[in-house]
Image (cartoon, rainbow, N blue to C red):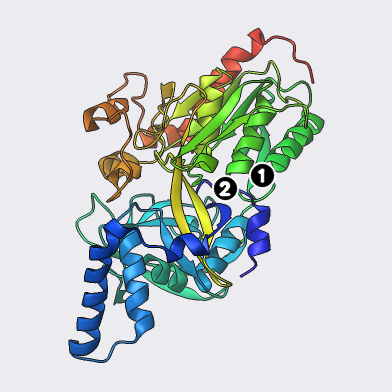
Amino acid sequence: MKFAALARSAALVTAVALIPATTAGMAQVDGKAGPEFSKLFATYQRIKANYVEPVDDEKLIRGAIDGMLASLDPHSAYLDGSDLERLETMIDGNYSGLGLSVVMDDGAVKIISPFRGSPADEAGLKAGDFITHLDGELIYGGDLDEAVSRMRGPAGTSIRLTVYRPGRDEPFDVSVTRGVIELEPVTHEIAAGNIGIITVNEFSRDVGADVFASWQAMRREATGRINGLVLDLRSNPGGSLDEAVALSDLFLDKGRIVSQRGRARGETVLYDAETAFRGQIAEGIPMVVLIDAGSASASEIVAGALQDHRRAVIMGERSFGKGSVQSLLIMGNDSALKLTTARYYTPAGHSVQEGGIKPDIRVPQLSDPDLARRAKFQIRESDLRGHLVNEVGLADKDLETDKSADPRFTKTAEELKEQGIEDYQLHYALETLRRTAPNTVARRD
C-alpha cells in the first residue's frame, strides 16, 4: 500500500489524516481495563482449546479487532492489504468495478447511490436497493469489504446481482458488466439562458482545481455573460475534506467554511476561506446547489458552508447526514485503523450528523416514477446501526418534516416526459435561475 499517496490526500471526511499509532501508549493497558482484557484472553484460550476445529491466531485476533470497531460506529474499520488498496483507488477515483457507494445495514449490503454514468447506474440500480446475492451466492450477514472486493474485477467481465427493492414484491436479478470507473469527478455544461451547470460526482484529488477549471472553461464557451450557476452535488458520497474546503473557498471571500471538533486536542481544526489562493469565482451570480439523500460527507460540508453564508440556494432533498471525520492511524507497513475521531460543524455551528442539510427549497425528483414508492425506504446516516447520535438530539418526526406535500409539485413523470423533462430537480433549478437572471447585479471576475 502506498501510504505516501494517502498522505498526499491529507484529509478525507470518509477516511482522514494519517496519524502514527503511539507504540508506547498502545503497549500500556489502563488498569481499569485489566479485568476486561482478562475476559478477552480467557475467551481466546477457551476457543483455542475447545472449538470443534482448530482455529489460527490470525483469524481470532482479526475477529476481535473487527468486533471492537463494529461496536463503535459504521465508519470505523481495520484496513489491511486489499482494503488499503481500495482506499487509495477511491482517493484517485480510478478502479475497475460497478461504480457503487454501499454500506452494511443490519447484515445487508445496501446501496447509498450508484455513481452517475457508471455500469451500475446504466443497469438501473437505485439508492436504497439491497444486494442479497452475488452470482447466486448469498452475501447477507457477510463482510462488506469482501462483498465490495467481489463486485470489483477486470473491466468487461460480468457479475449477477440479486436485488431486493423496497416497494417490489419479489427480488430480481441484474447482470452488470464491470467497467473502468474513471468517473470525471467534475463535469460542466451550459444550459439555455447561459446558465452554467457544474456537476461534482465525488471529492477525489484536485476537485477544487477542476471546478475552477470548469468555471473558466464555461466563461470561454458561453455566448455572453453567465447568468446563473447550478452546482450539482446529488448522489455524491463525499471524499476529501481538503477538496471540500477548496471548492467552498472558490465561492466565499471570507469567513468559516467548516470546523471539526474531536476529543483529542489535535482533532479540533478550523477551516476558513482564503480566496487569495485563486480568487472568488462567480461573484454576484445567483447560484443553486442541488442535493439529495445520496449527498454525503464532503458534499454536505460544501452545501452547509454555502447555505450558512447565504451564497447559494440549496434545493432538492435532505442530504445523507454524515457529520463525522475519520482518521487513518497507521498500525504497520500494511495495516491501519480508520477511526472516527471528530465531528464537523457548519459555519453557523450546526452538526449535520443524522439530520443532514435541509434544503431551502425542497424539490422532489418527479421525473423518477419509482422514487416516490421508495422514498420511505431511502437510507441515510440515521438509519445505520450504531451511528453517532447528534448531540442536540433529533426526533424522527423532525428529520422527516421535509416530506410534506407541496402543491407546486403535482406533475407526473409521464407528463414531464411529454414535455421533454428528464431531470425535474435540475429543470426546476434552471428555471429558478432564469427567472432571477434579469435582476442579477454586475459581477467582478
Residue 43's place in the image compared with 444, above or below, is below
Q: Residue at x 44, y 21 (%)?
A: 360
Q: Residues within 10 Å of mark 1 (few under 14, many from 20)?
A: many
Q: Which residue is mark 2?
A: 202
- For the C terminus, the image quarter is top right
| Residue 207, disc | 1
Q: Is 197 displayed left or right of 164 in the figure? A: right
Q: Is 440 displayed left or right of 443 in the figure? A: left
- Measured as percent of width and height from the top left, residue 94 is found at 62, 61
Residue 51's place in the image compared with 83, above or below, is below
Q: Residues within 10 Å of mark 2 (few under 14, many from 20)?
A: many
Labels 2 & 1 near each other (Cβ < 8 A): yes
Q: Quadrant of residue 358?
A: top left
Q: Secondary structure at mark 1?
A: helix
Q: Is 100 displayed left or right of 256 in the figure? A: left
- Measured as percent of width and height from the top left, residue 10 is found at 63, 50
Q: Secondary structure at mark 2?
A: loop
Residue 98 in sight from this viewpoint: no
Residue 193 in sight from this viewpoint: yes
Q: Residue at x 50, y 68 (%)?
A: 83
